[in-house]
Image (tube, helix red, strand yellow):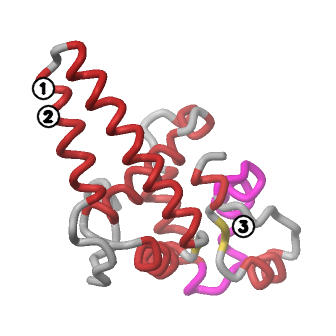
Amino acid sequence: MAITDKIYLKNHRQIVSQLDVNIPKGAFKGATMEVLYSGEGLTNVDDATRERLLDFAQDFLDCDDPDDIYTGYPERQFVRYLLDLRAQGLGPDAIVDVMSDDYMVYAYPGDVLSFLDQSIRRLEAVESLAAVEGSDEMERRAREARQALSGSRVGRTVRRARYRRGPRVG
């Protein structure tokens, strides 16, 4: 199961009550994204919730090709966000705190830890395969990425600015 299948809306019951429609708790479920990120859905929630949901939509759902929304684009962007937080030295608990503050979504720290562990194992495999194939550049890149994820800065709870993949337009 992908980590994005384990990302949930914070205050789900409150949001459902405000919308007066039942939606799945999973942030990346099709029905959730359809209702919440349509103009109609956002007009029915309180201002603080709307702001965070708009941030989520702009950072993860705003793609160049509208069809990309159905090809895993939002999930890939969110995985990059999680890996970026980890590379900055945040541990699973701090990652959950930041994503909750930034976007009103949460995950269980154990699920984030499992995701990070799997990511490190995959990078180890890429590094080993690159060494066998003699691809020094790929081996170096995989090693650096693995070290960034498993570095000694684990558990630091430094707060960071909200994630942005680029400058906001409008």
Q: Residue at x 30, y 72 (%)?
A: 154
Instruction: Give 45 or 145, whichever is nearer the viewer.
Output: 145
Check if mark 1's residue and mark 2's residue have beta carbons within 8 Å: yes
Q: Residue at x 23, y 13 (%)?
A: 133
Label 2 to label 3: alpha-carbon separation: 46 Å
Q: Which residues are magenta?
A: 28-49
Confirm whether the magenta stretch covers residue 32: yes
Label 1 to label 2: alpha-carbon separation: 5 Å
**Secondary structure category for the residue under label 1:** helix
For disc 3, the neighbor class at 10 Å (few under 14, some 14 to 19, many from 20) is some
Q: Which residue is mark 3?
A: 41
Label 3 to label 1: alpha-carbon separation: 47 Å
Instruction: Give 88 or 117, whichever is nearer the viewer.
Output: 117
Relative image position of residue 54 (x, y in whole percent): 52, 68
Check if mark 3's residue and mark 1's residue have beta carbons within 8 Å: no
Relative image position of residue 169 (x, y in whole percent): 32, 57
Relative image position of residue 110 (x, y in whole percent): 57, 68
Asked whether, in this view, residue 6 is left or right of residue 61, the answer is: right
Q: Which residue is mark 1?
A: 137
Q: Which residue is mark 2?
A: 140
Q: Nearer the viewer, mark 3 or mark 1?
A: 1
- Which amino acid does the dot numbered 2 rest on? Arg
Asked whether, in this view, residue 73 is left or right of residue 38, the answer is: left
Q: Quadrant of residue 150?
A: bottom left
Asked whether, in this view, residue 42 is left or right of residue 21, the answer is: left
**Secondary structure category for the residue under label 2:** helix
Give the number of the disc on residue 91.
none
